[in-house]
Amino acid sequence: MATPHFVRAGVLIPWAMVMAAVGCAAQAQASEALARKNDCLGCHAVATKLVGPSYKEVAAKYAGQADAQALLVQSIRNGSVGKWGDLPMPAHPKLSEADAKKLAAWVLNLK
């Protein structure tokens, strides 16, 4: 049996590529929902500065840093001050390490 394909604009796209794209979109929606659930969007927005920097600004600042996700997880869970000015980011210690990693990964993938 042949591998299933998806036809788009006359081009055959392997089904695995289609499913990977769908999976990435679902993960992005889940991470945004996680940000909403934990009130992150009260201070941050994806593309514009609110109280804190936009998530795209954060992604740009940490682009190419091997330890970027770990640094963001630490800031999310422990809070920070001085990285984006004088206004501190409050700690979110009740947020699980796993959820903080999901949020950090989502932010870092925004471009």
Image: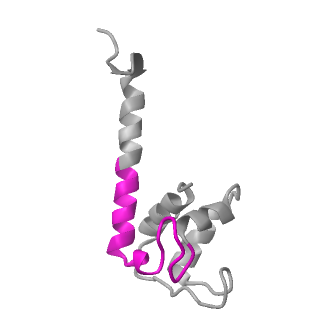
Q: Residue at x 46, y 65 (%)?
A: 103
Q: Residue at x 55, y 84 (%)?
A: 79
Residue 52 in percent (x, y) is at 55, 80
Q: Quadrant of the N terminus?
A: top left
Q: Is residue 29 above or below residue 21?
A: below
Q: Residue at x 40, y 81 (%)?
A: 94
Residue 74 in percent (x, y) is at 58, 75
Q: In the image, 4: left or right of 73?
A: left
Q: Is residue 72 above or below residue 26?
A: below
Q: Residue 42 magenta-drawn?
A: yes
Q: Residue 110 magenta-drawn?
A: no
Q: Residue at x 60, y 62 (%)?
A: 59
Asked where in the image residue 57 lies, by quadrant, the reply is bottom right
* Residue 29 or residue 78, whichever sits in front: 29
Residue 49 in percent (x, y) is at 54, 75
Please provide the residue range marked out in magenta. Answer: 26-53
Number of marks in the rendered image: 0
Q: For the view shown, which residue lies furthest in the left direction?
A: 1
Residue 20 in percent (x, y) is at 41, 36
Asked where in the image residue 80 lies, by quadrant, the reply is bottom right
Q: Quadrant of the C terminus?
A: bottom right
Question: Tell me, what colour scheme is on the image?
Answer: one colour
